[in-house]
Image (cartoon, grey):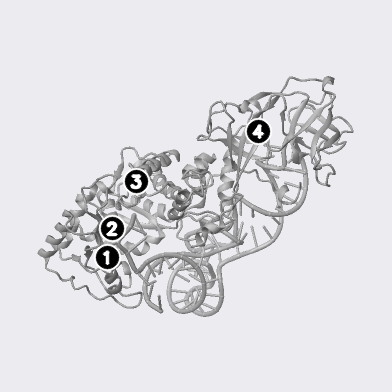
Amino acid sequence: MSDPSPKLDFIREIIADDLATGKHATTITRFPPEPNGYLHIGHAKSICLNFGVARENAASGAKCHLRFDDTNPEKEETEYVESIKADVQWLGFDWGSDLYFASNYFEFFYDCAVHLIRQGLAYVEQQSAEEMRLNRGNLTTPGTPSPFRDRPLEENLELFAKMRAGDFKEGECVLRAKIDLASPNMNLRDPVLYRIMHAHHHNTGDAWHIYPMYDFAHPLEDALEHITHSLCTLEFENHRPLYDWVINHCPVPSKPRQIEFARLNLTYTVMSKRKLLQLVQEGRVGGWDDPRLPTLSGMRRRGYPPEAIVHFCKRVGITKFNGTTDVALLEFDIRDHLNASAPRRMAVLDPVKVVLENWSAEPLSHVEVANHPQDVSLGERRIPISNEVWIEREDFMEEPEKKFFRLGPDRYVRLKGGHIIRCTGFEKDADGNISLIRAEILPGTVGADSPEGVVCKAAIHWADAATAIEAEVRIYDRLFTVEDPDGVEEGFLSVINPDSLKVLTARVEPSLADVEPGFSCQFDRVGYFVADALDHQPGSKPVFNRTVALKDSWVKKGGR
RNA sequence: AGCCUCAUAGUGUAAUGGUAACACCCCGGAUUUUGAUUCCGUUAUUCUAGGUUCGAGCCCUAGUGAGGCUACCA
């Protein structure tokens, strides 16, 4: 596995600079999700950046905080908090003792707001949301001042205290910063700092009736935690002036710097939390951990190795360019990791029976097969075999094409790990489908090259008919049929691929009967599979999810 | 329309102002008891126009294109 370029991205360069010049003795970053949904592959990029920077600068005492940005009680739940913690750990990162909740800073935020009021930099607004919108102006025309903008200081203090006490109904008033109604940056046109919400908060319960807005709370959270570099995505670029304004006008213990980078976009992948939530709520998928979802829990269940995801994030890099990465890049890293680590097993997904008519010529009770074609340290295993085996239907052609190397009438093929066999005949059912294949073994060909005059160019996988067990195998395809379902604003549900999940009953070798959930392996020429942790019922059929298909250009070329 | 940001093969990223490169994808070939892996090879790149400079992907100006901003979401 090749390591990504050792070259520093622009953010790491800034951090290295700040360390070199002594601006900071160390660096403290933070990963600040709002607990309003499950984490997805896009978050992985941010996690790898923030925790990665901390890990790389560990020598200077760098660290990365996990902070839940829970300032909006209407959308946040404890279930999400727990899933987020699990996902960060799954990726291999550790926040140590630095686990924080923005909601624990509510009192401090309140004090800062009072401070701003006393400085004449904030006022209680009593226009409606609609009026505020109208008076904010638009992209080209400045806003007009609120009639409450120059409310006396004492009155602001009194009103704000009442807001906190719960004396107002939701929407009745808000606290606004007094900045610049003519600013070309809309975020600076007296942004709202606090709104009234009589909602139950997952952490603070019913203690508060006012909740701070992101733009007010986030810089304060960072400053309070002595974050040196606050890394966020590009859409917050226009918020940086406001971020700095808050830092510069509130009594904070440190001055963090916000730096923006491009979020991850993947082809055929929905990253919008709103849309993922919709898919879950409408039952279009099995849940947040549905293996077709790009959530980290979905990928875990699908068998994506966390190391491969981390490697992918490094390879994609950090820039300010807003592009769309081909999922093929991700899938390559998954295959790359699995190819090296996954043991091989045999499974037949679409079975047709082969009767070995001269089995008595050299009968075997089992064969020895390597668990990995390159890595001998993974050892071998014994697989039972007898005179009847299942092979893949596509491994036989009644009238073989020019580039078809497998079985056909009077042709030779090797049963992987076993004999070379020759097809001596076949039977069809009423529908004209092959129902049985007859063949003979070539004695002396186990573990040996093909004899003179025998053309055997392929080895196929098989399952012993006498001992094979049945397993449920789930083949996942892309959930969406267009490259950018996120771009399909209103009709994104219409591009769901109805064939995104196929469930098959496969015949697999007995060693797969009792594997641990999470066990991943490669089924020869079919792809990588993982034993499902959720649907794995002891004593019943094992369930395997296909992680990713093998790279099979020959199939695309019409090779079968 | 105003402001902010960005622009390098099909995709994602590199390149102290000094020969434009790496990975993925695609295609071709060799090896292979997985049509996988591995190995070798092919195609293809600096948005446009000016300027500074001995020399510009990099610096400057303009244009074009893309993304973001007019939430009591984050």
Residue identifier under label 4? A374
**Local crowd size for mark 4, using a 10 Å CA cut-off: few (<14), some (14–19), many (≥20):** few
Residue identifier under label 1? A191
Quick one: quadrant of the N terminus of chain A?
A: top right
Mark 2 belongs to chain: A
Left/right of residue A64 with respect to residue A409 in the rendered view: left
SS for dot 1: loop
Q: Looking at the image, is A196 positioned above or below residue A502? A: below
Instruction: Point out the tag, 1 or 3, that comes first from the N-terminus.
Output: 3
Q: Check residue A213 in the rendering and tell me which mark sits there, or answer none.
A: 2
Residue sitting nearer the eye, B16 or A356: A356
Residue sitting nearer the eye, A395 or A208: A208
Instruction: Point out the tag, 2 or 4, that comes first from the N-terminus.
Output: 2
Give the distance between the C-alpha atoms of the residues marked 3 and 4, in whole angstroms. Answer: 47 Å
Residue A428 image position (x, y, % from top left): 82, 38
Tell me, yes or no, whether dots 3 and 4 are on the same chain. Answer: yes
- x 69%, y 46%: residue: A552
Instruction: Point out the tag, 1 or 2, that comes first from the N-terminus.
Output: 1
Tell me which amino acid carries mark 2: Met
**Local crowd size for mark 2, using a 10 Å CA cut-off: few (<14), some (14–19), many (≥20):** some
Say whether marks 1 and 2 touch (CB < 8 Å). yes
Q: Looking at the image, is A359 positioned above or below residue A233? A: above
Give the distance between the C-alpha atoms of the residues marked 2 and 4, in whole angstroms. Answer: 56 Å
Residue identifier under label 3? A77
Tell me, yes or no, whether dots 1 and 2 are on the same chain. Answer: yes
- Residue that sits furthest to the front in the current view: A430
Residue A331 image position (x, y, % from top left): 58, 47
- x 33%, y 70%: residue: A185
Give the distance between the C-alpha atoms of the residues marked 1 and 3, in whole angstroms. Answer: 27 Å
Tell me which amino acid carries mark 1: Pro
